Each structure stands twice: as structure tokens, then as C-alpha cells.
């Protein structure tokens, strides 16, 4: 608009040239209009222009409202926190410390629950048939990352999504299982931690059993034949023979099998048992410890959680450390990293944990050499 047109708009006599149907004029009820304090805008429409009048107070009010709305919208966007999915195959009452370790790892990566992230917890309570349902719910809620423990739970989540990043804990080889392409370059949307048990670790557990129960001649290992991560039975049998142990294997895949296995061990005069660290058993740690106590059977476990629940002895990697690493990786992904670029971490720290009270109850004397090398002794 040129200066002359602007001056014409500012003159009071311009009102007489406005069309009578204009609401701004009709509202005056025949009075001589005054345009003091009125701001005009010209809006081009086609070949002509339309004049719009608005009072200064109205203009200030409208403009102030618009400006005030900007920070509100910005704050609304900032208040949206990314959601993280957490799927544990066990019960919350038994494995709450896993969630705490996970949150600790997240915090190390700059993310704190309730402040800049939310966490959606799912506990399978040992019901593996419901893992797929939990996985689908997390995907439906569009969480940013899914943290998951155990191979069965990982496969359930993997089947539910190929786009949402997944950070896992597995007790076997993730490459052999087809979860990742390689340890250094996982590829796809999965990475995580592996705590798989080597033949050397199984041999170490048998040695510990032999030290604690030197008179034992018969031992049994409880395994789940439905789990792909079965221990090497041939290698373990050979290792047991070197220690003078006759080894048998008891198949357990249901809760009813679990009770029957301990009863069978007593009927066969088994002197001690070794519990596989397959997910089926890990999710039932408290019940297994209770059965071992009822039948007065010394038992060796893979995880500290058993000994904390009054089990006798455990040797293996730390699940608490693993969950903390999962938290760190989850934080990295929230910060922009891609799962395909985060190498799979192999557990490198192993812990020997003893429960002296349980040993005393079973009438066992713990050798001083064993106490000396224990990482933790629960009294």
C-alpha cells in the first residue's frame, strides 16, 4: 500500500465511502463515526481490497492472547515425556531390584523416571503364555524403547515389532538364536546383554557342589527341554565323572513337573541338585528354594537371587549388573543412538554367593577356602 492510500484510510470522511452493510458502520446507529483509536488493515481480495477495522484495545487484547499462547504451547510440547517399556518374565515382588537397577542405568544416561521419562512396567509372573500379550500392549502404547529380560520374552517382543528399539537380556548366544547379526554390529532393532553360561561355568558349579558336599555320589540337574538354551549334557556328564559324581537329568517344563522332580530326586537317593539358569527356573526362584528346603536337598544355582531367597550357593554373572547395562543402553537410544550401532555386551563379572544359615540348616560345613573366595556371604 502506498502512502496516499494510507492517508485516505486515516481520514474520518473515509467512513462515508464504506459500504452501508459493513457491520462496523451499522453498529453506529446513524451517529457520525469516529475512527480515533481504530487500526485499519488492507487485505487484498482479487482485484480490490477489503478494509478491516479493529479497536486498539481489542487489538492489544488479541495480540496479547496470541503471544501469551506461544509459551503455553511450547511448555505443553516440552511436558511430553517419552515412555519406555519394561518387560520382566518374573514377579514384581521377587525381582523389583531388577527394575531398580534398570532405573539406575537410565539415570546414568541422563534419564530419570517421572522427570523426563515415564516407564510402563509389565510383569509376566512366570506365565510365559502371556508374554506375547504383554509385548503387543507395549507396542500398542507406542513406547520409545522396550527393555526385556529372558529369551522367551525377547522373542515375543521381536515378533510384535520390527521398528521399536529393543534392549534385551538373554542367557544364550543371541547370534545363534537369530536375534542379532553379530555381537559388534547387531543390525536391526535389537541389542543388549548376554549372560549365557559356558561349559566352564557349569564345571565350576559342579566343583563347588563337590566341595560343599564331598560325600555326594549322585547328583541331578533340573532342565527345561522346551527351552532352546539347554546346557551341554554330554560335557556336564564328563565333568561330573571327573569329580566322582554320577549325573542324571530331570526334565521340568511345568509347575507340576517341578514338584515331581524334587520328589523323584529323593526317591532316587540323589545327594544334591543343580538348577539350570533357564528362564523357567529363574522366574520361580522362591518356589524352587522352598522345595529344596522341604526335601533337604543341597542345591547349586546360577544367580544370586536364589541365595538371597535362602538358597545354598550360586555362581554366575550378575543379573543386577545386566539390568543396569540395559538401562544405560536404553538411555543411549533415547539420546539418539541406534540399536544396530550398540554392540551386544557379554557379561564379564561373575560372583560366588554363599548362604551360611542354609548350609547350617542342611548340616554342611563350608570349607574356609570356599569362604575366602566368595564374593558375598549371607549369614
Image (cartoon, rainbow, N blue to C red):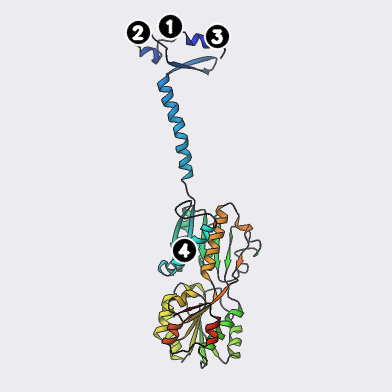
The residue tagged 3 is 4
Q: Residue at x 44, y 10 (%)?
A: 18
Which mark identifies residue 100? 4
| Residue 296 shows in the view | no
Asked if disc 1 and disc 4 are in contact, CB closer than 8 Å, the reply is no
The residues bearing labels 3 and 2 have C-alpha atoms spaced at a distance of 27 Å
**Residue 286 vs residue 78, the one in the foreground:** 78
Q: Mark 2 against mark 1, which lies toward the viewer?
A: 2
Q: Residue at x 51, y 68 (%)?
A: 320
Which mark identifies residue 31? 2
Q: Residues within 10 Å of mark 3 (few under 14, many from 20)?
A: few
The residues bearing labels 3 and 4 have C-alpha atoms spaced at a distance of 73 Å
Which mark identifies residue 16? 1
Residue 301 lies, with reference to residue 151, above or below; the image says below
The residues bearing labels 4 and 2 have C-alpha atoms spaced at a distance of 76 Å
What secondary structure is marked by label 4? helix
Asked if disc 1 and disc 3 are in contact, CB closer than 8 Å, the reply is no
Amino acid at each position: 500500500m502506498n502512502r496516499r492510500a494510507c492517508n485516505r484510510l486515516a481520514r474520518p470522511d473515509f467512513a462515508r465511502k464504506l459500504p452501508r452493510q459493513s457491520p462496523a458502520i451499522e453498529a453506529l446507529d446513524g451517529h457520525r463515526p469516529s475512527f480515533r483509536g481504530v487500526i485499519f488493515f488492507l487485505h487484498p481480495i482479487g482485484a480490490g481490497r477489503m478494509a478491516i477495522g479493529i479497536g486498539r484495545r481489542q487489538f492489544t487484547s488479541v495480540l496479547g492472547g496470541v503471544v501469551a499462547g506461544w509459551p503455553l504451547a511450547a511448555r505443553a510440547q516440552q511436558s511430553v515425556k517419552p515412555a519406555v517399556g519394561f518387560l520382566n518374565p518374573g514377579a514384581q515382588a521377587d525381582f523389583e531390584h531388577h527394575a531398580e537397577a534398570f532405573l539406575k542405568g537410565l539415570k546414568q544416561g541422563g534419564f530419570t523416571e517421572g522427570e523426563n521419562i515415564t516407564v510402563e512396567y509389565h510383569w509376566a509372573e512366570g506365565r510365559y503364555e502371556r508374554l506375547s500379550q504383554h509385548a503387543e500392549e507395549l507396542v500398542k502404547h507406542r513406547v520409545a524403547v522396550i527393555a526385556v529380560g529372558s529369551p522367551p520374552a525377547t522373542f515375543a517382543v521381536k515378533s510384535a515389532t520390527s521398528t521399536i528399539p529393543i534392549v534385551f537380556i538373554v542367557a544364550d548366544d543371541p547370534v545363534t538364536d537369530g536375534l542379532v547379526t553379530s555381537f559388534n554390529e547387531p543390525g536391526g532393532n535389537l541389542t543388549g546383554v548376554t549372560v549365557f553360561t559356558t561349559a566352564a561355568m557349569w564345571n565350576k558349579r559342579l566343583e563347588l557342589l563337590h566341595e560343599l558336599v564331598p560325600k555326594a555320589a549322585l547328583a541331578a540337574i533340573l532342565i527345561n527341554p522346551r527351552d532352546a538354551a539347554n546346557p551341554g549334557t554330554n560335557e556336564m556328564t564328563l565333568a561330573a565323572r571327573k569329580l566322582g559324581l554320577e549325573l542324571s537329568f530331570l526334565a521340568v517344563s511345568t509347575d507340576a513337573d517341578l514338584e515331581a522332580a524334587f520328589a523323584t530326586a529323593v526317591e532316587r537317593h540323589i545327594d544334591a541338585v543343580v538348577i539350570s539358569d533357564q528362564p523357567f527356573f529363574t522366574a520361580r526362584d522362591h518356589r524352587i528354594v522352598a522345595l529344596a528346603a522341604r526335601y533337604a536337598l543341597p542345591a547349586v544355582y546360577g544367580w544370586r537371587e536364589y541365595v538371597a531367597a535362602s538358597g545354598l550357593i550360586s555362581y554366575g554373572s550378575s543379573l543386577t549388573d545386566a539390568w543396569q547395562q540395559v538401562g544405560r543402553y536404553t538411555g543411549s537410544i533415547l539420546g539418539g543412538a541406534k540399536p544396530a550401532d550398540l554392540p551386544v555386551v557379554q557379561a564379564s563379572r561373575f560372583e560366588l554367593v554363599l548362604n551360611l544359615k542354609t548350609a547350617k540348616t542342611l548340616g554342611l560345613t563350608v570349607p574356609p577356602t570356599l569362604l575366602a573366595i566368595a564374593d558375598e556371604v549371607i549369614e
